[in-house]
Image (cartoon, rainbow, N blue to C red):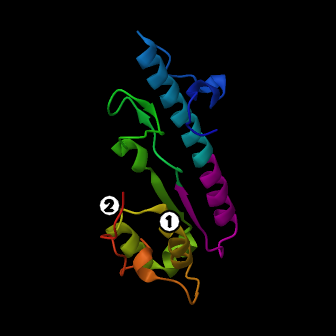
């Protein structure tokens, strides 16, 4: 599972959809794309199960957050593949997908929170702030919560130093 090299070992054969390659570089890119296709299938399946549960149980207030642990440079920069570079850190390695899902009940109870989520959707976020984001999106009171570290908060500080 996931999209680490060797990419061809990260998905079942039925997800080998991108398979026409003229050279080894194209073969690696295709294998990576297949691993992403399978990863997307798994994430979508989990979100579908959660959604169905919420439909059957109308009072459930639920959220889900998905993100990759890191990005992967697949010939995006410097003709390299992977994520372990000593001298140059490609942008592809630090910019990752970030998905937020919420139930219909959550949507009806927290319209202001959803407005903040939408207004912050293009702001940079670093996963060391995830604890504060989870506390915030789930409306949990915690004395050490720092709203400026939650991307789901109007006080979020998007100017905090990052890589």
User: Could you tell me which quadrant the C terminus lies in?
Assistant: bottom left
Residue at position x 42%, y 18% from top? Answer: 26
Q: Earlier in the sequence, mark 1 or mark 2?
A: 2
Decide: is 122 above or below 156. Answer: above
> According to the image, label 1 marks what residue?
128
* Residue 39 place in picture, x, y as percent: 57, 40
* Residue 90 place in picture, x, y as percent: 35, 42
Which residue lies most toward the left here? 159
What's the magenta region? 45-66
In the figure, residue 93 lies in which quadrant?
top left
Decide: is 117 above or below 76. Answer: below
Residue at disc 2, secondary structure = loop
Which residue lies most toward the front here? 87
Query: What is the spatial separation of the Cα atoms under label 1 and label 2, in whole angstroms?
Result: 18 Å
| Disc 1 and disc 2 in contact, CB within 8 angstroms | no
In the figure, residue 126 lies in which quadrant?
bottom left
Which disc number belongs to residue 122?
2
In the figure, residue 5 lies in which quadrant?
top right
User: Could you tell me which quadrant the N terminus lies in?
Assistant: top right
* Residue 10 place in picture, x, y as percent: 62, 31
| Front residue of 120 and 47 | 120
Residue at disc 1, secondary structure = helix
Which residue lies most toward the bottom here? 143
């Amino acid at each position: 599972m996931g999209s680490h090299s060797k990419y061809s070992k990260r998905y079942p054969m039925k997800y080998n959809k991108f398979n026409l390659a003229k050279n080894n570089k194209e073969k690696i890119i295709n294998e990576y794309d297949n691993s992403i296709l399978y990863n997307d299938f798994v994430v979508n399946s989990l979100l579908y199960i959660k959604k169905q549960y919420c439909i059957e149980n109308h009072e459930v207030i639920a959220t889900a957050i998905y993100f990759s642990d890191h990005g992967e440079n697949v010939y995006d920069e410097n003709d390299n593949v992977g994520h372990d570079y000593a001298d140059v850190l490609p942008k592809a390695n630090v910019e990752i997908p970030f998905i937020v899902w919420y139930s219909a009940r959550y949507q009806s109870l927290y319209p202001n929170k959803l407005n903040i989520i939408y207004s912050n959707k293009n702001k940079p976020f670093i996963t060391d702030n995830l604890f504060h984001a989870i506390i915030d999106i789930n409306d949990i009171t915690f004395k050490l919560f720092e709203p400026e570290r939650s991307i789901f908060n109007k006080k979020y500080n998007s100017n905090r130093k990052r890589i």
